[in-house]
């Protein structure tokens, strides 16, 4: 196992089951320090469980590894003290003000100057002027900033984000990600699960997990290249009809509408070309070769992932 200064997480062969159902299967991976690592996959596919195992919050049934230089089995308590965890659900006190919530968290972690730490965090996250506003009265975007401030107040070395921007507007999401990148630039390692493709593209590296299995990982460009998808963008008349006709054809792994166009993709180039040939010559349809997007890859991976509940 590598515990070099550049590696925050280094695990091998992690497996975890609940009630006889395997939710993480033989997972091995490395995460660099100061990187933002995104986890994508269908609901219930083991993303959150994987993240919790990686940082010692859950003990694997088998496998080994280190997180922040500590053994994930023997040193779980040491790891937990250096982890900030932001869940989907807002978990601070709704009837306390912004300032009171942050001061409470600061005292909980034993920070010497709780008021000063809260004041500095309020300034950093642009919450000035809202110090005395009750947390329960904040919009989704401001609650998100407050939650981020609370979980980074004790200066963790690893930050876990479980679909952190669900239900907030695009500007709030962008502001949130700007702050995440600033934290990573200061050396914080971030693990984030998300369903948003634009957020995945903001990560330094991503991993696609489907029902406990790690199918692909790397940079966004590497993941797209590994998909080996040949993609066409189709415009023209009756695209819904074309979707029905192409779905399930040999070599056609994905047919998905994107606005006023259709994306048609497949990994078997010869089979794909043979299946779409009858429609390539139609004058009311326009076919253009295009590079697959991350969303194309995501949809194609989902289409061939088997739900282990079934």
Image (spheres, grey):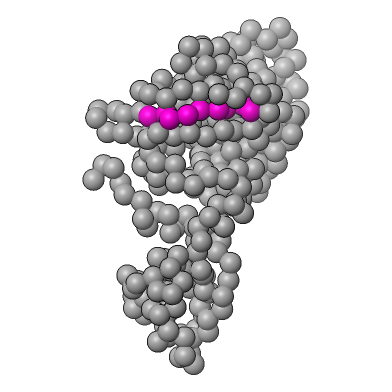
**Viewed as shown, does residue 36 lie left or right of 241?**
right
Give the vertical position of 55 relative to 197 (above or below).
above
Q: Nearer the viewer, residue 10 or 35?
A: 10
Asked if the magenta segment contains residue 201, the reply would be: no
As displayed, is residue 287 above or below residue 304? below
Determine the residue located farthest toward the bottom in the rendered image.
Answer: 283
Q: Which residue is at 27% across, 33% downward?
A: 21
| Residue 100: quarter of image | top right
Magenta-colored span: 7-15
Q: Relative to residue 98, is residue 252 drawn left or right?
A: left
Looking at the image, is 179 positioned above or below residue 229? Answer: above
**Callout count:** 0
> Residue placed at 46% from the left, 16% from the top?
73
Closest to the observer: 192 or 165?
192
The answer to whether residue 13 is magenta is yes
Front-most of residues 186 and 140: 186
Q: Position of residue 160 (x, y in %)?
A: 55, 30
Q: Tell me the quarter of the picture where residue 126 sits.
A: top right
Q: Is residue 212 visible?
A: yes
Residue 45 shows in the view: no
Query: Which corner quadrant holds the N terminus?
Result: top right
Query: Mostly what secondary structure, the magenta segment?
Result: strand
Q: Quadrant of residue 276?
A: bottom left
Q: Tell me if 240 is positioned left or right of 180 in this view.
A: left
**In percent of the image, x 40 and y 33: which residue is there?**
26
Q: Can you give x and y, in whole percent of width and height, for residue 254 in the image? A: 42, 66
């Amino acid at each position: 196992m590598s515990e070099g200064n550049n590696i925050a997480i280094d695990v091998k062969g992690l497996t975890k089951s609940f009630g006889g159902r395997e939710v993480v299967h033989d997972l091995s991976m490395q995460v660099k320090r100061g990187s933002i690592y995104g986890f994508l996959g269908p609901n219930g596919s083991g993303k959150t469980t994987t993240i919790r195992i990686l940082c010692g919050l859950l003990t694997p049934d088998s496998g080994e590894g280190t997180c922040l230089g500590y053994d994930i089995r023997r040193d779980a308590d040491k790891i937990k003290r250096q982890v900030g965890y932001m869940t989907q659900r807002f978990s601070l006190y709704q009837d306390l003000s912004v300032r009171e919530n942050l001061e409470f968290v600061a005292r909980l972690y034993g920070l010497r100057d709780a008021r000063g730490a809260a004041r500095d965090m309020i300034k950093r996250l642009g919450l000035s002027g809202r110090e005395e506003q009750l947390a329960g009265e904040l919009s989704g975007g401001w609650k998100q900033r407050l939650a981020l401030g609370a979980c980074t107040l004790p200066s963790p070395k690893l930050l876990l984000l479980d679909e952190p921007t669900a239900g907030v507007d695009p500007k709030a999401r962008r502001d949130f990600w700007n702050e995440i990148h600033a934290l990573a630039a200061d050396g914080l390692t971030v693990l984030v699960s998300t369903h948003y493709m634009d957020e995945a593209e903001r990560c330094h590296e991503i991993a696609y997990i489907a029902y406990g299995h790690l199918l692909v990982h790397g940079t966004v460009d590497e993941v797209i290249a590994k998909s080996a998808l040949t993609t066409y963008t189709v415009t023209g008349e009756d695209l819904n009809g074309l979707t029905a006709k192409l779905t399930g054809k040999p070599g056609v792994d994905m047919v998905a509408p994107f606005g006023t166009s259709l994306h048609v993709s497949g990994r078997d180039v010869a089979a794909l070309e043979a299946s779409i040939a009858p429609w390539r010559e139609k004058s009311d349809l326009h076919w253009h070769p295009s590079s697959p997007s991350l969303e194309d890859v995501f949809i194609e991976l989902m289409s061939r992932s088997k739900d282990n509940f079934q």
